[in-house]
């Protein structure tokens, strides 16, 4: 094979391998790259033309956390984008910029290929004038030159590809991890988005319940209701979670809509799961007393609650006061 043919073969081989490596890297982005790329596609709802990936606002940070969680759970890019657009009013698609790590990823192999090709051309045009006794070794080195350059260029490509293909995502936070953390600093909006994006996740019930409790504590029954109902009907909810959801639903049915029969039925469902639930017994007693006028049944339930050793001093005081009122024939407060 002539030197010219050999050089052409080397260049073609370098091009083929560079293109293959670029394709492999581009089609196998790390989780960090995916999160960044998705974030750059979404406009921050409260910012002036910035993507959520580049905005320092708390809402943008919450949205990026949601993207990270969804990526860790295996959602596709399109699914994540659709969920963000549906969950956050004002979020719209942006044209993603060609910059940062992705740009370097594409340019490095191409630069290595181009550098190798230029060196080969220069090598061929500036062979030098070797002495007579070194002609043989110089000829050999000229033949080996393109192969050495090929090896160097491939080494650069492999190093760059390895850097981008390695796992640089760090410990991802999924819905299971988030549900087990202190959620005090997580907004209701973010929790709603996480729950919506992971509605079928087997461990989402804990977050649903935490979110519902927030709404319940401020008296927002309409927002709490769908989450309590979802937990109560979930096949993945624990017994304690189901009992809490049923008890809350029962009290909201009574306190919000004066639905006595529905409330009692829900309390009975909770007691069927946990017959020792003092909360279910006490609230059922209140509804029987205040809603159904069944004083004797209410009295019996209050007495059973007082027999429970785990009552806090405050709870015991409240139940004792209600029991005394029932026995005295007082009206429901």
Image: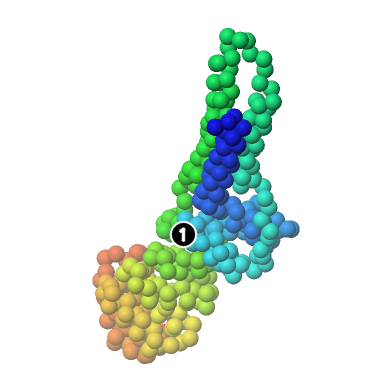
Q: Quadrant of the N terminus?
A: top right
Residue 274: give x, y in percent of width and height. Answer: 28, 73
Q: Where on the picture, by quarter, is residue 177?
A: bottom left
Question: Could you say where residue 42 lies in the image, as x and y percent from the top left?
Answer: 64, 60
Residue underneath mark 1: 74
Of residue 249 and residue 103, the one placed in the foreground of this image is 103
The residue located at (46%, 59%) in the rendering is 74
The C terminus is located in which quarter? bottom left
Q: Is residue 27 above or below residue 207?
A: above
**Side (left or right) of 277 relative to 174:** left
Residue 60, given in percent of the width and then of the height, sits at: 62, 57
Most foreground residue, 289 or 216: 216
Question: Could you tell me which secondary element the residue under label 1 belongs to?
Answer: loop
Relative to 73, residue 240 above or below: below
Quarter-of-image position of residue 201? bottom left
Within the image, what quadrant is residue 318 found in? bottom left
Question: Outermost residue, bottom direction?
Answer: 293
Q: Which is nearer the eye, 270 or 234?
A: 234
Q: Is residue 243 above or below residue 169?
A: below
How many numbered markers are drawn? 1
Compared with 203, 124 (above or below) is above
Instruction: Identify the residue at image location x=50%, y=47%.
Output: 169
Of residues 158 and 14, which is closer to you in this image?
A: 14
**Residue 160 visible from this viewpoint:** no
């Amino acid at each position: 094979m002539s030197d010219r043919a050999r050089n052409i073969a080397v260049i073609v081989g370098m091009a083929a391998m560079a293109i293959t490596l670029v394709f492999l890297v581009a089609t196998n982005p790390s989780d960090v790259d995916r999160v960044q790329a998705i974030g750059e596609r979404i406009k921050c709802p409260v910012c002036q033309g910035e993507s959520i990936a580049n905005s320092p606002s708390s809402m943008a940070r919450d949205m990026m956390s949601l993207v990270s969680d969804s990526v860790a759970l295996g959602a596709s890019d399109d699914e994540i984008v659709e969920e963000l657009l549906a969950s956050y009013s004002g979020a719209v698609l942006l044209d993603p910029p060609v910059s940062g790590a992705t740009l370097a990823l594409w340019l490095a192999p191409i630069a290595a290929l181009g550098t190798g090709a230029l060196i080969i051309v220069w090598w061929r045009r500036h062979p030098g004038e070797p002495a007579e006794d070194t002609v043989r070794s110089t000829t050999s080195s000229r033949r080996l030159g393109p192969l050495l350059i090929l090896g160097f260029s491939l080494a650069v490509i492999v190093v760059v590809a390895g850097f981008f293909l390695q796992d640089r995502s760090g410990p991802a936070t999924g819905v299971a991890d988030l549900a087990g953390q202190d959620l005090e600093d997580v907004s209701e909006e973010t929790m709603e988005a996480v729950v919506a994006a992971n509605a079928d996740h087997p461990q989402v019930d804990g977050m649903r319940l935490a979110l519902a409790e927030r709404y319940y504590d401020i008296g927002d029954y309409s927002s709490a209701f769908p989450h309590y109902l979802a937990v109560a009907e979930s096949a993945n909810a624990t017994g304690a979670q189901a009992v809490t959801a049923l008890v809350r639903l029962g009290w909201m049915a009574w306190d919000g809509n004066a639905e006595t029969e529905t409330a009692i039925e829900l309390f009975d469902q909770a007691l069927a799961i946990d017959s020792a639930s003092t909360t279910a017994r006490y609230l059922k007693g209140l509804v029987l007393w205040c809603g159904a006028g069944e004083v004797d049944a209410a009295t019996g339930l209050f007495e059973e609650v007082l027999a429970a050793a785990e009552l806090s001093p405050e709870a015991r005081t409240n139940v004792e006061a209600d029991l005394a009122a029932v026995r005295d024939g007082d009206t429901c407060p």
